Image (spheres, grey):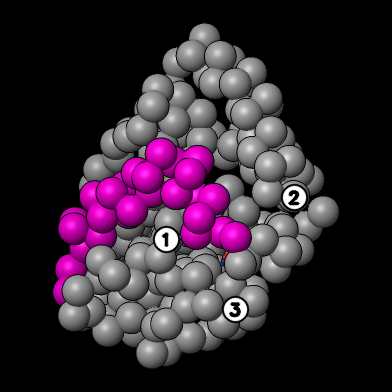
């Protein structure tokens, strides 16, 4: 199953499920990142159904996602079908780039970060939040055992078992943010952890002036 078909198939259920799985915290975790980003024109990379639109304030939002099914549910004024690895925008087009719960689904984090750096203006900022594993190896092992049981069970209850097995596997795809983002063209300003056992990570970066 490709990540494209996962999001096409669960588009209608996505927001409710995300909220259940995060115990209602997914919006707070997005807000922690958005509050650190500048005003102006912002790219929501992997915007999905537009869950973050409510917290962008009066920023000028461009929602980008490869899934037309997810974007159809997104009420942003400007919507673009596309992928992070090949952004259809001019250099320096944005004051900020935001991305929530997308990075473990990317084909290439390095290509996406090169593109993010290109479309940001000098001094512009990028903020990312995603799910992964807790920092400590021992705690990560416990977390992995837990999600191997809980996520397929949640999937069965909503008729999307395969999709939730994909989610379980995707949590192991990326290393911690300090490693994942070490070689980007942006300066890493801050990383932090949130959620039960710290399995949610966030990072804020700035493009050099
Ligand atoms: C878990 S959803 C998150 C949606 C939204 N950001 C949110 O906070 O609810 C992941 C999204 O990433 C999108 N996606 C998958 N691969 C992508 C890529 N290569 N570039 C950009 N977005 C991608 C999916 O279509 C999906 O809408």
Quadrant of residue 193 within the rendered picture:
top left
Q: Can the viewer see residue 32?
A: yes
- Residue at 50% x, 50% y is 18
State which quarter of the image contains the C terminus: bottom left
Check mark 1 vs ligand 1: CB closer than 8 Å? yes or no: yes
The residue furthest right is 1
- For disc 1, the marked residue is 99
Magenta residue check for 186? no
Magenta stretch prevailing secondary structure: helix
- Residue at 42% x, 89% y is 78
Labels 2, 3: front one: 2
Measure the C-alpha gap from mark 2 to mark 3: 28 Å
Q: Is residue 171 left or right of residue 19?
A: right
Count of marks, rendered view: 3
> From what the image shows, is residue 184 above or below residue 58?
above
| Residue 76 percent across, percent down from the top left | 39, 83
Residue 82: mark: 3
Check mark 3 vs ligand 1: CB closer than 8 Å? yes or no: yes
- For disc 2, the marked residue is 159
| Residue 72 percent across, percent down from the top left | 57, 82
Quadrant of residue 171 within the rendered picture:
top right
State which quarter of the image contains the N terminus: bottom right
> From what the image shows, is residue 70 above or below residue 75?
above
Indicate the quadrant of ligand 1 in the picture. Answer: bottom right
């Amino acid at each position: 199953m490709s990540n494209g078909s996962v999001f096409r198939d669960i588009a209608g259920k996505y927001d409710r499920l995300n909220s259940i799985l995060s115990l209602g915290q997914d919006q707070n975790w997005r807000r922690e990142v958005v509050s650190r980003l500048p005003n102006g024109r912002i790219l929501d990379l992997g915007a999905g159904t537009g869950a973050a639109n409510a917290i962008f304030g009066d920023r000028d939002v461009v929602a980008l996602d490869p899934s037309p099914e997810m974007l159809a549910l997104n009420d942003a004024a400007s919507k673009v079908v596309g992928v992070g690895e090949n952004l259809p925008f001019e250099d320096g087009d944005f004051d900020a780039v935001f991305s929530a719960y997308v990075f473990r689904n990317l084909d290439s984090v390095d290509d996406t970060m090169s593109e993010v750096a290109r479309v940001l203006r000098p001094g512009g900022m990028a903020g990312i939040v995603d799910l992964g594993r807790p920092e400590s190896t021992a705690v990560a092992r416990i977390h992995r055992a837990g999600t191997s049981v809980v996520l397929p069970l949640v999937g069965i209850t909503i008729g999307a078992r395969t999709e939730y097995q994909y989610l379980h596997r995707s949590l192991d795809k990326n290393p911690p943010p300090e490693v994942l983002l070490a070689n980007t063209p942006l300066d890493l300003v801050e990383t932090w952890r949130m959620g039960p056992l710290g399995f949610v990570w966030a990072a804020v970066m700035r493009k050099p002036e």
